[in-house]
Image (cartoon, rainbow, N blue to C red):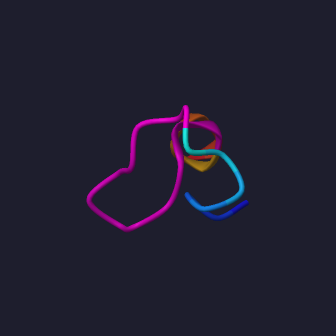
Amino acid sequence: MNAEQCPAQENTVDGGDAISNKVL
């Protein structure tokens, strides 16, 4: 999921969204 799709999520240093960050 890109930040553009989830603007409410905080972007991670990797450029991913918070949801992807939880997976990592």
Between 5 and 16, the one lying in front of the other is 5
Horizontal side, residue 23 vs residue 10: left or right? right
Question: Residue 6: horizontal and vertical position, in percent?
Answer: 66, 46
| Residue ID at (61%, 62%) | 4
Pick the front one: 11 or 4: 4
Q: Quadrant of residue 14?
A: bottom left
Is residue 18 shown left or right of residue 15? Answer: right
Relative horizontal placement of residue 1, taking residue 3 as reference (left or right): right
Residue stretch rendered in magenta on the structure: 8-19
**Residue appearing at x 64%, y 38% in the figure:** 19
Q: Residue at x 53, y 49 (%)?
A: 17
Which quadrant of the figure has residue 13? bottom left
Q: Residue at x 50, y 60 (%)?
A: 16
Does residue 14 show up magenta in the picture? Answer: yes
Query: Is 24 covered by the magenta stretch?
Result: no
Q: Position of residue 18 (x, y in %)?
A: 52, 38
Q: Which quadrant does the N terminus fall into?
A: bottom right
